[in-house]
Amino acid sequence: MRGRVIAERYELEERVGAGGMGVVWRALDRDLGRPVALKQSHAGDNGQIRREARIGAGLHHPNIVTVFDVVVDADERWLVMEYLPSRSLSEVVAADGPVHPRLAARIGVQLASALAAMHAKGMVHRDVKPGNVLVTDDGTAKLSDLGIARWSEVTRTGGGEIAGTPGYLAPEVADGREALAAADVFALGATLFAATTGGSPWGSSGPSVQFRRALAFELEQVEGELAPVLGELMRRQPAARPAAQRAAELLGEIIGETPPVAVRRRSRRGLVIGAAAAVALLVAGAAVYAVASRPDYIGDAATMDPCALLDPAALRRYTELPVEIVRDHEFFNRCDLWVPLGAGENDAVRVELKVQQPALFGELPPRPDDVETKRYPLGDGKCSTDLLLPDGNFVQITSSHVDAKPVDLCGMTSDVSNEAQRVLMKNHEIPRRQQPYPSQSLAHVDACALLRGPDIFKAVGAEVPAYPEMGGWGCSWDTGRREVTIEFMREPPLDPARNGRRITAGDREAYVKAGIENWPDACSARIVHRRYQDTPPMIESLRVYLEEDKIADPGTLCDGAAALAQAVAGRLPAP
C-alpha cells in the first residue's frame, strides 16, 4: 500500500494506526504539500466512512481532529483528516506510566470542552477512551474516531448492541439504555481515571467482567487529587453528573484555567432541541461551535442575498462584453456571474458563488472579525476559492469555462473573491435581500420536516438521523447502503423528455426517472411546487432521490421514490 496514490492526490507514506473502526495512514497531499491522515474502514465499509465524515464535517474545535474531506478511489471511500504528530493517551500511559493528576486535568479540560461543543450540536461521541485521545508533545489533546458518534436523539443501544468500550462504559449504557451526553461525561471520567492509575475504573479482568461491573456499578477506589472531580463525573445516575461544560470548569479549577464556552446558535426559526428527532436534527444542523463574541454571518438564511457579494465590475478587465448576474437560479444559496468572452454562445465563463455550511477542511478564522481566504490551484477545468466566515460557514467561489477553453480562471476567481471578502468584512454578514421571497416559496420550508420516521424507515429499512443542508433547503438520511436525499431547486419547467415518467404526487405534477446524471445508483422523483417567473418560465421544484450503493438496476427504486414523493407533497405549503 505504501506509495499508492489515493484519488490522484494523496500519496500513502506510512501506516500509523489501526483499530476496530479502520486503518489510518499518514499521507502527503500532493496539491497542498502538507501531511494528512487518511482513514480506510475495514472490509470496505463505505457507510461508516460517510457517517464519520458527516459527523466530523460539522465540528470545528481545536480539540477535535479536523475532517477535511472524503474521497473515492476505485470502490473505496477514504476519510481525509488533519495529521497530528502525537501518541494516543493509552500509548502514553503504556510507555511512560500513569500521568500526573495536573496533566490529566489539563487534558481533561480540553476533552470536556470538545464534548461540550459536540453536545451543543446534539451529538454524542459514544466511545471516549484513552485510545481515542491524541496527545502531542506540548500537551494538546484531541478527540478522534467519530466512527460511532451519533446525533443524541436517535442513539440507541437496542438489538443487543452496546455502543462503546466496556472499560469506559457508563452503567446506564451497560443496562441497555440510550447513550446520551451524560454517558460521554462518565467515559471522560473513566478515561482520566485510567490516565492517572493505569487501569479502568471497572478493573482489569477483561471485557465481560468489566461489563458486569459496569452494570452493577462496582467502581474501583477513586483516590488522589482528582478524586472529587472524577467522583462527580462518574456518578451512577446520569442526571447527577455535571454537563461537559461544567466538567471543563471543574477540571480547570484544579489547574487555574478557564475553558472556552460552546454555544448553540438558534436556527432560523428559533427552535430548541426536543424529543422529536426530525425537529432536533434541524436545529443541530444549524448549530456551530463558536465563542460568544463571534458574529452570525448567515442570520435568517431565507433573507440573505448571495448575489450582493458579486460585482460584475470586478471582471471588467477580462471582457468588453456585459457581465450578467444570474439571480434566483438553481439552489437558494447560490448566485452566478455569466462572463461572455466572444461571439460564440458557449465562449463564456460561469462564476458560481455558494454559501455553504461549516467547511470540511478547516477551523474558525483566528480573529472573530476575520474572513479567511483559502485558494486552490486549477484542477478539472475549474478554479476555486473559499472564504471561511467567523461563524464557521463559508462562501465557495468557482470559475469554469463552458467549453473548457484555457482562460485565466484563477485570476477571475481571485478578483471575484476579493470583492466578496470586502463586502463581508464591511457588513459583518451576508447582505439581506431587497425583495423578500413570497410566503409560499420553498425558501421558507425545512426539507427535513417533509419526511418523517416511518417514511424513512420504509425507504431505507432503518431508523437514521437527518442531515440538514444550508437554510434547511436540503436534507439526507443515510444508512451507508441506502440514502434518501431532498433538494430544493429553481429551474425551467419539467417535461417527460428530460425528466422521466410523469406521475401525480398529491395534487402536483411530478416526474420519476432512474439513473440520472451524477446519481447513477438512484431513482429521482421531481415535484413541481410553483411557477415564479414567466419570462423565461421558471419553477421551484423538489428533487427526492432514493439511492442504493452499487445497485444493479436503479429502476427498482422508483416505486420507493414515488412513495416518498407522495409523502413530501402532502406536507408542502400551498403554491
Image: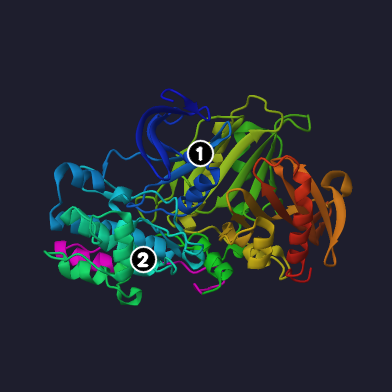
Splitting the image into 4 quarters, where does residue 278 fall?
Answer: bottom right
- What residue does disc 1 label? 43
Rendered residue at 24%/43% (across/down): 91
Q: Is residue 305 above or below residue 181?
A: above
Magenta residues?
A: 247-274
Asked whether the residues under the numbered discs 1 and 2 touch, taking CB atoms below 8 Å apart as contact, a structural biologist would say no
Indicate how the structure is coloured in the image. Answer: rainbow
Q: Is residue 300 visible?
A: yes
Q: Which mark is residue 183?
A: 2
Where residue 408 appears, x then y in whole percent? 59, 28
**Which quadrant holds residue 75?**
top right
Using the image, determine if residue 409 lies above or below residue 283.
above
Can residue 138 be seen at all in this image of the molecule?
no
Is the N terminus in the top left, top right, bottom left or bottom right quadrant? Answer: top left
Helix, strand or loop at label 1? It is helix
Residue at 54% of width from left, 65% of height from top? Answer: 281
Viewer-side residue, 84 vs 376:
84
Is 300 placed left or right of 174 in the picture?
Answer: right
Q: Report the Cα–Cα distance between label 1 and label 2.
A: 29 Å
**Numbered marks: total:** 2
Q: Which kind of residue does numbered mark 1 sit on?
A: Ala
N-terminal-most mark, 1 or 2: 1
Residue 412 vertical placement versus 225 (above, below): above
Relative to 170, 195 lies left or right? left
Helix, strand or loop at label 2? It is: helix
- What residue is rendered at 19% in x and 62% in y? 257
